[in-house]
């Protein structure tokens, strides 16, 4: 890459060189790059076509998934959360051994045992694990539409200064069999817990209606809350975890 000095100032292509402006300077490069027609037709670009097809599929699935949970994801305040979900669904798509490369799908990948492991290990926040905020065992029964925390111990929480309550909500999201759209997202009633110092464990249960859909994702969200003169103020955004899925 060269930088043009002197009085000549133009952009475009000339004699195998490409001129463009960047940072107030004219940059010179050899012309080249991908040829759209060749990519679509020539055998040597087959892998490029396969990768492009699969990436497009994953991006659409991710967009559809994200749209259903958009309000909650927005309240999390995470930059580039779409990119994180794309990475998750791309890894799940790669588990599809039923389809040829270029035709693999996220739905086929979800039907492998490893997919649940990827979901369980996935964190929406890039640097903070959900267990940092909620370090308790969780069990979910979608037949009953219930989420249970068998042993909730307030003293194990590391809460922000000023927190008086912890708000919990169980959610279940229904999608069609090809993950083209959410059919519905259902929520439990918010469970607001007054946080008093206690080392004693108590059971918690949240109940949620389960959408009638071929594919279900489910999770838990929490918010630290400060009560001031009867008014409740959320602190530091929503924390959320995708706990799993079920066909």
Image (cartoon, helix red, strand yellow):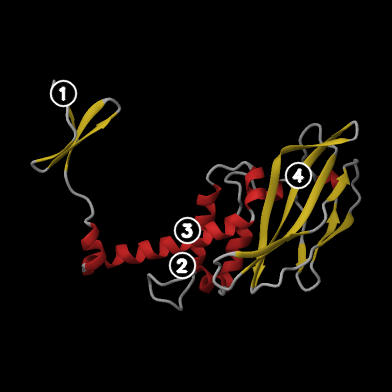
The vertical placement of 63 against 146, above or below, is: above
Residue hosting label 1: 5
Q: CB atoms at circles 3 and 4 under 8 Å apart?
A: no
Residue ID at (8%, 41%):
15
- Label whose residue precedes the other's in the sequence (4 or 1): 1
Q: Which of marks 1 and 2 is nearer the N terminus?
A: 1
**Neighbour class for label 3 at 10 Å: few (<14), some, many (≥20)?**
some
Q: How crowded is mark 1: few (under 14 residues within 10 Å), some or many (20 or more)?
A: few
Q: Quadrant of residue 149?
A: bottom right
- Along the line of sight, which residue is nearer the eye, 138 or 29? 29
- Give whichever of 28, 120 is nearer the camera: 28
Mark number, residue 139: none
On residue 94, the disc is 2
Q: Name the residue under label 4.
A: 223
Spatial separation of the CA atoms under disc 4 and disc 1: 57 Å
Q: In this view, does 196 lie above or below 33?
A: above
Q: In this view, does 39 lie to the left or right of 131?
A: left
Residue occupying image coordinates x 85% and y 57%: 151
Q: How far apart are marks 3 and 2 (CA)?
A: 14 Å
CA distance separating discs 4 and 2: 34 Å
């Amino acid at each position: 890459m060269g930088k043009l000095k002197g009085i000549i100032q133009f952009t475009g292509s000339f004699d195998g060189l490409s001129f463009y402006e960047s940072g107030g300077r004219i940059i010179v490069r050899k012309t080249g790059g991908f040829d759209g027609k060749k990519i679509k037709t020539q055998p040597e670009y087959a892998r490029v076509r396969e990768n492009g097809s699969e990436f497009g599929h994953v991006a659409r699935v991710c967009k559809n998934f994200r749209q259903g949970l958009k309000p909650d994801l927005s309240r999390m305040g995470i930059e580039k959360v779409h990119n994180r979900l794309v990475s998750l669904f791309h890894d799940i798509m790669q588990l599809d051994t039923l389809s040829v490369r270029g035709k693999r799908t996220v739905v086929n990948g979800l039907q492998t045992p490893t997919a649940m492991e990827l979901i369980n290990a996935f964190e929406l926040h890039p640097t903070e694990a959900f267990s940092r905020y909620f370090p308790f065992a969780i069990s979910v029964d979608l037949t009953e539409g219930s989420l249970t925390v068998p042993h909730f111990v307030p003293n194990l929480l590391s809460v922000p200064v000023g927190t008086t309550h912890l708000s919990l909500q169980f959610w279940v999201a229904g999608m069609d069999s090809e993950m083209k759209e959410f059919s519905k997202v259902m929520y439990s009633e918010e469970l607001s817990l007054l946080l008093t110092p206690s080392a004693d464990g108590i059971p918690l249960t949240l109940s949620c209606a389960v959408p009638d859909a071929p594919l279900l994702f489910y999770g838990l969200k929490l918010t630290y809350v400060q009560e001031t003169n009867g008014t409740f103020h959320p602190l530091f955004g929503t924390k959320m975890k995708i706990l799993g899925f079920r066909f």
